[in-house]
Each structure stands twice: as structure tokens, then as C-alpha cells.
Amino acid sequence: MNLEMTRRSMLRNVAFGAGAGMFTPILGQLAAHAAGDARAVRRRIVFVLQSNGMNPGHLLPSGVQRPRNGRPTNEKLEELALDDRQLHEAIEPLAPFKDRMTLVQGLSGRISLGDHSANHGALGCYPGNKGPLAATIDVALGEANPGIVPHVGLGIMNKPDQMLNYQLSAAGPGKAAPLQCSPELAFQSLFGSVTGGSSRQAFDRRTLLLDFMADDVKRARTALAAEERQKLDSYLDAFEALRDRQGKIDAIKDDLRKQAPNLDDKFRKPTECNRLEAQFDIAAAALITGLTNVVTLASGGGGQHYISFPELGVPVDGHHYGHGGGVEGKNYEQCFVAVRQFHAKQIARLARALAAVKEGSGTMLDHTVIVYLSDSGDGHHPSLYEWPVILLGNLGGKLRTNGRYLQFPAYGAKSHRTMANLYCTLLHAVGKPRDRFGVPDPGLKDVDQTGPVTELLA
């Protein structure tokens, strides 16, 4: 990834052939980005889900303690600045971005309670053991804030040959939105059209097929009665939308070619660390080129999908150290810390990549928020009375993530807030306000569960 590349320098060399007129709006937006026009700035959201729970203690800055036995019982919001405090060693790689972060404790998600994972409930705020009941927040934000591809889902599973994860994102009731867990296939899907060879040929064949299908539907509809034509129009809209996406991708092919990550070494040696690093590189490139504004990155997650990281000195999967088991040279807590440090390094690397690209009066990072959490909330076997979350970036000034630690009122307190309130906050921040998300927690019948978390909105 060339961190010094800017939108201006990328666009300077873009050349479009015949038919580029239909892409004038896209080119205008890209040119406006390169020229620093703030009106063209897009807001971006990245979800990073790490399996095996996020220990609330890993979010404690220096000088802050939790009750030795049990969870916090505070009735009011507790807030402090991170200025002169050290981050826990588990998330220390994020220290350079401390003034852009908010560490969030105390949001609950009991409605999603599961054994080892909340599954779709982690991002959907509904029962986690009943499959996809509604669109998850990542997909909802992709629809509210669409790029060429509304939502990109990437991840890794505990075996390299497991290509897809169907258990975390959803497009609607009964509609899982799979995460692509093969970096090589994810790369080909997003950048194959500009890397030549069979990938380019397949892209061209798919484009021609979509052209043919759309034309065929148009011809067929002329022979139908009005009622039948109306039904057929939905198919035509779908084909034309897919064809339009193909055209938009082709319109930025030079931009894609320059930003496509070089993943040869990671493909040749697909270790766990390499695969996750590759997915972060692909995510950065997809965001920088404007392919998408919303990405989900999952490290395992859903069911009991845990990753072992031999390169980190953790050759066992998370279930082992999640139950207190250690490995040679590390106890269970040291295993947790080593694995979380690696994930924090990837998030920091992504943040640096976005910070290196100028956009509007600032950088792409200035218009992004990275949401770091676990699909199983606060632990390997979670309680979900609290769901630790790290927010990095203020989404173009829409969020207050200016170096704070927040401990929200405990579960059951009058001012308690939930993960659904956090997701409403993100929808408010992208200009698609919603005051309800998912399914209310019946254990909080005396608590107002509607609306955003106002303490996080700018």
C-alpha cells in the first residue's frame, strides 16, 4: 500500500475511453475529492469484530480500576480524559491515536445473549441464536451511506479453506450477508478487473452478460400487459443496477490498479497473521479508491470460530485460553493480550493508511470511524451486561471521540444505554437518523431504550 498516494495524484493519470460520459458524476466527485472540496467528502465506517470476547479490563487506562468482584454499579456516567493516561498493553498500539479515540464501557446487549457468540445479534441487536432477523448495522449503514459497493465484508476463519462466514452480517430477515474469508478471492472480486488475465476477461464477460440480460428483459416487457410489465421491471432494475456497478468499477480502473495491494507473499504463505493482514490491506484499498464506504472485518466470530496465531506464540485457538488454558511461556491472559495487540496493530495500520490520503480540508481518517468490538461482547462466555467498544475517528466531526474514557450507567440504571443506542448514534451521524434498532431488551422495561447516545454525538 502506497501511503503517500493522494486522490489528486491518482486522478491525474486516469484516462477514460468512449462511453465515459455516463460516469461524469462519479468523475466529478472523485475530482472534487482530489481538489479538497469538502462537499464531496464521504463518511466511512469500519467494523472490526474479534472473536473470543473483549475483556473490559483491556479498555482501562492507567489509574482506573474496576470492582474486584462483579461489574460496575455506577448510576451516572463516569468520564475522564485520556491525555496523560497510558492505555492497557493489550491496545497500546492504538496510543498514537489516543486523541481521536473514545473507550466505551457499560453499554449492554443482553437481547443478543448467546453461548460463545451473539452471531448476527452482535451487529443486529436481536436474539443471537435465531439467525438473521433483520439487517445488521453494517449493512444498514451501507444502504444509508452507499459507495459503488454498499458494504464489503471480509474476514478470516480458523481454516484457510473456509471461504465464507454467514453468521455475523445480514441484509434483512433470513438474508445472511456473507463475509469473504479468502483474501485471494476477496482481492479478485474487488480488484480482479484491473489485474489482467482471466480476472479481467471474467469481468468483461459478466458485463456483457448483464448487458444482454437487461436488453432481453426490455424486449420481453413490450409484449406483456401492464401488470406483468410491473413485475418484470423489478428484474430489469436489478440487472441495470448490477450493470451500473460494473460500469462504475470500470470507470475507476486506473485508481483501482494503483491502489490494489501487493499480496503475493501473503497468498504464497497464508498464515493466520498473513491472512488477516491481507484483509486489512484489501479493506484500506477498497475505502481509499471509493469502492465502498462501509467495511466489516471479522477475525473468526459466529458460533465457535476461533483463530490460533502460532506466529504470536499462541498456537491454540481461543477456546483453549478462553477457558483459562495457557501455552508454553504464556498464561491465558498473556495469550489474550498478544492476540489483541496484533489486532490493535492492524487497526492502527489501517488508520495510518487513511490518514495518509488527503480529502477535503483534512484526510480520509478525519471522515472515518473504526468501531472495534467482539462478537461475544465482554467475554468468552459473555454476560452482555456490558459490551466494550473502542471508537477511533469522529466521522467528519459528527462524533465526539476526542480522547475520552466513558463508563456508562450500569445495567438497570435509569440512564443506562445499550448497543442499540450506539447503532442509532451511527445512523444519526451519517444523516439517516433512527431512534430504534433491533429488539428492545425486556429486562430493561423501566429504561428508555430509544434514541442515540447523545454523549457520543458532536
Image (cartoon, rainbow, N blue to C red):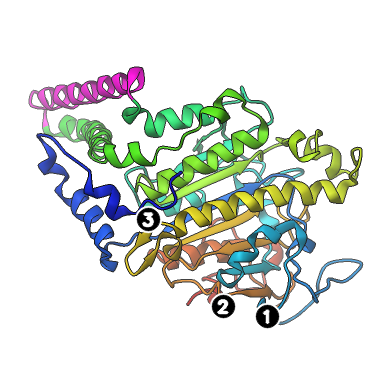
Circles 1 and 2 in contact, beta carbons < 8 Å: yes
Label located before the other in sequence (2 or 3)? 3
Q: Position of residue 186 (x, y in %)?
A: 47, 32
How many residues crowd mark 3 within 10 Å: few (<14), some (14–19), many (20+)? some
Circles 2 and 3 in contact, beta carbons < 8 Å: no
Q: Where is residue 251 in the image (x, y as percent from the top left)?
A: 22, 39
Residue, disc 3: 144
Q: Distance between the residues labelled 1 and 2?
A: 10 Å
Name the one closer to the observer, 23 or 267: 267
Residue 374 visible in the current orientation: no
Residue, disc 2: 455
Residue 156 relative to residue 428: left or right: right
Residue, disc 1: 79
Residue 403 relative to residue 245: left or right: right
Is residue 371 part of the magenta span, yes or no? no
Circle 3 — which element?
helix
Name the one closer to the observer, 89 or 396: 89
Q: What residue type is labelled 2?
A: Glu
Label located before the other in sequence (1 or 3)? 1
